[in-house]
Amino acid sequence: MLAHTFPEALFPSPSKAPELQPEMRVGFILCPKFSLLPVASFLDALRHAADEADFGRQVYCTWMTIGPEEGEVVTSSCGLAAQVECQFPDPNEFDYIIVAGGHLPDCLEVAPETLEYIRRARSQNVAIVGICTGCFILAKAGIMDNIRCAVHVEHSRQMQLLFPDTKPVTDQIIVTDDDIFTCPGGSTALDLAFSLIRQRCGRARAVKSLTSLMVGRQRAAELAPDREYAHLFSCGNSKVESAMGIMESHLASPFSINELASRVNISPNGLLAAYKRHAGEGPMQVWRNIRLSHSRWLLLNTNRTITQIAYECGFSDCAHFSRWFQKKFSRTPSEFREIRK
């Protein structure tokens, strides 16, 4: 089959990825007959948060499937299979270890090494996440005594009978107890992923996932009630709404108003007029403020250098970044970072 060549303007190549320590490192333990939807939801949320646009590189987030044996094939409840990428490494290589459950009782047939690894991770204070019936595996590993966990109402009685020392919760989609995070499966894994990404990587990265995954506006508003310029995502003007999605997908690589207008199929003057009407300011100002707000989070919550933050937020150099940051927040980035101390 002949390879196709596509125009660079339609599918631009990514710029060189910044050399940064990822903010969120995740290991996935896939149990026998795991449910595909929650795993796919969580993974795609990570993928969109991890890089600019739709490039999918593991820059700001990293992930891998782990298990007792590298190369082992684990089959999901729907028949699709996944392969273990790495034999269990040191748990401290991860910020979160995701235990993906699925069809009961099949998913409980995990290797003794898996249960021991979960216990070791817990003893080393690594955060544990159970998605779908993953909380059953956590309970089998013996780390759920007197711990609240989110369970699908259909499995609540099974949990109570099998593991009477747990505290199943059926009326919440996310339950956090003593650094153990659980959700009952299905699309609730997306809500949990968004919550953890927001906590580790900042609101802008998490909202990028929502935008890229086309999460419904009502649900997105519930997940991110304080989203900057939230009203512009449902202002009734399709060009403005589309442009906002593009902005949040290109935090590190903003481009001209001409290019932005072209991507949403409107003239630059038309886009400017639409933003003036709905936002009271131009699209470039809106885009810059979104990037500056993300830089503020990075200054407060990470150890990245100011140069690295300037790059990640789409500024050409430190001086340019500092000028705009001081104009918005009345402090230089260096002064603002002192707040952390």
Image (tube, helix red, strand yellow):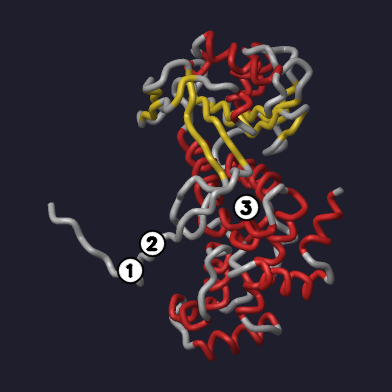
Identify the amino acid type marked 1. Glu
Give residue 222's position: percent from left, percent from top. 70, 55
Crowd band around label 3 with a 10 angstrom C-alpha radius: few (<14), some (14–19), many (20+): many
Residue 290 in percent (x, y) is at 67, 67
Relative to 209, is 272 above or below?
below
- Image side of residue 9 versus residue 225, left or right: left
Q: Return the disc, 2 or 1, that comes first in the chain's sequence.
A: 1
Foreground disc of the pair 3, 2? 2
The CA distance from mark 2 to mark 1 is 7 Å
Which mark sits nearer the N-terminus, 3 or 2?
A: 2
321 or 71, nearer to the observer: 321
Residue of label 1 = 8
Query: Considering the numbered disc 2 on the image, is that residue within a helix, a strand or a loop?
Result: loop
Residue 121 picture quarter: top right
Find disc 2 in the rendering and name its residue.
13
Q: Amino acid at mark 3?
A: Ala
Question: According to the image, label 3 marks what residue?
Answer: 206
Q: Residues within 10 Å of mark 1 (few under 14, many from 20)?
A: few
Identified at 72% across, 64% down, the residue is: 293
Q: Is residue 231 visible?
A: no
Q: Secondary structure at mark 1?
A: loop
Instruction: Check the image and report above or below for 329 versus 62.
Output: below
